[in-house]
Amino acid sequence: MDRAVSAREGLAVAALVAGLMLAAGALLPPLAIADNLVEDFAISRIVPPRPQQAGIAVIGVTEDDLAALPYRAPLDRAMLAKLVEVLRAKGVRAIGLDILVDQPTEPAKDALLRAVLTGAGAPVVQLSAGRETPMTEQQRRFHDAFLVGLRTGHGALARERLDGVIRRHFPWLDGLPSLPAALAEAVGVPIPHQPFTIAWSRPLPAVPVYSAAAVPLLPRAWLDGKIVLVGLEVPDIDRHRTPLTLGGAAMAGVEIQAQVLAQLLEGRNAPLAGPWVRAGAVVIAALAGAGLAIAGLSTLWLVGLAGLGELVLWLGAAGLAASGGLVLSPLAPGLSWLAALGTASALASVRERRARASLMQLFASHLSAPVAAEVWRLRHTFLRGGRPQPRRLMATVMFSDIESFTPVSERLTPERLVDWLEAYLEAMTEVVTDHGGLVLRFIGDGILAAFGAPIPRDDPAAIDADAVQAVNAALAMRPALDRLNQRFAAEDLPPVKIRIGMVTGPMVGCSVGARRHLEYTLLGDVVNTAARLEGLARTVEPAPGSPCRVVVAQSTWERVAGTVEGRPIGPVALKGKEQTVMAYQIIC
């Protein structure tokens, strides 16, 4: 992986991913539902259990209690009145009736219940139906008249719009306190004015629950000084989904009210992370993902660290919840982490492919695979601004040319001439690249190649090896030309004979031209000397039957002497050079 994404670009990726993730959480219901489910699981399975709230008790009217009454609904008012009296006698602190009175029963029993509720003793808070509760006009009139003079509290349970689970509580609704809020207020506990997240307690039940029929038999100490909530504990009636019922039976409404009352009495807040913490976790995860992507690691490392990071997020969230800390779903941060890592990695990969394509385009197809791999491996020191930076080199330059090219070009048709020349250039390019050379350009029928470029050589042994490779490439051109000439003879094309000039020395490797048309080139006297030696080669006799003549400067001969057969030509004066050059012929 190329570190092609800058820190600024990484920040941009992180900001984009974090923004999209936060928007998705607000706009995409499936993501919000999934987040809620993860947090519900933590609340119901991971958050440490709490002891039962000792100051609250629930009196449940069960199926057995209903079976003993003359009718199931509406609930027998005399039974309720008797239950309130018994509870007061046992010294309860306050009573909350989570039972709606919305229609008349027997007049005497209705009157008895009102008398008991307004009588002396522990205060009673009667459930009141909010304006959104569906009722007939007759029910509403009876309900409102019955509640006149009573302490009341609404029993609205706020279901989430997306999944119907109860997670929040409204202590005030249309100017009326909720049932648990009114009970807390009745015992002198201040109640909040804003909705809040319910701090659920497990295991269930969170408070002691007793059957209504068993109340007269309970020891006074079990109820003395407690706030008591009375409600239905009947399957399929007043049952609701909460985080604690994930995968299980729904919770009775009266037990939900008891959970809220316990939270108000204890002054607890839900351990759920707030919106700023959630947003911060998403942003940090995105920054971490983008930062990892621009660290220059391999794809295998990135995949492994991506999975490890995701595991750490989930285990960290679970550990935080298990220790009694914040409950935070790692789903959104985990997606943010992966999305930022993937996006920045993809951007880096695109940049890498573009950089590689640009580099390879610069050298076309005239770079051997090992040299290309080395260029790419050293690209951070080799490139500057997307192009090779000028570097001083000690390399061997080869310049070759076809003998009698002009007469041949005049005899052949343009199409056959091009086919003949392309076949030759392709064969010679293959020889050069097979020997680690770089074909810089074609100059008509001439080939300019270098051995030891574009990567600088600091080791003298490597410079010598480049010279040996260059000479070996020249020698390898003879059998390649023999094969090519056999083919040309079969196609009635003229044979190819070439001259080669070669010199080893210092030069500067760089790219020149416009950004849309760059060309890698070598600058220095060495390049000109190689061209002059190629011209000198026309003055020497080739080996018998050989299609090539090779002349090298002393700087190259000294590095290959003893490995190839050759002979001295002598000091020669080359055009444009003040001093003579010692030249040698390589027997090819």
Image (cartoon, rainbow, N blue to C red):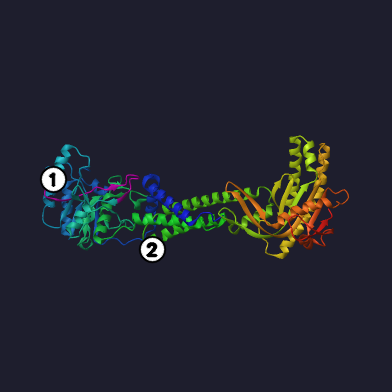
Along the viewing direction, whichever of 556 and 99 lies nearer the viewer: 556
- In depth, the one of 222 and 296 nearer the eye is 296
Q: Is there any visible trace of residue 115 in the rendered image?
A: yes
Q: Earlier in the sequence, mark 2 or mark 1?
A: 1
* SS assignment at label 2: loop
Q: Which residues are magenta?
A: 144-167
Q: Is residue 159 magenta?
A: yes
The vertical placement of 310 against 238, above or below, is below
- Residue 40: x and y in percent read 37, 53
Q: Given the image, on which type of amino acid does mark 1 rest?
A: Phe
x%, y% of residue 197? 30, 54
Q: Toward the viewer: 407 or 180?
A: 407
Q: Badge 2 local density, few (<14 within 10 Å), some, or many (20+)?
A: few
Q: Quadrant of residue 265?
A: bottom left
Residue at image point 46% right, 59% down: 312
Circle nearer the viewer, 2 or 1:
2
In the image, what residue occupies the spot 25% across and 55% down?
58
Is there any visible trace of residue 289 in the rendered image?
no
Q: Amino acid at mark 2?
A: Ser
- Circle 2 sits on which residue? 323
Q: Quadrant of residue 208?
A: bottom left
- 501 on left or right of 15: right
Gap between marks 2 and 1 measured at Cα: 48 Å
Badge count: 2
Q: Position of residue 202 (x, y in %)?
A: 33, 57
The residue to which callout 1 is attached is: 146
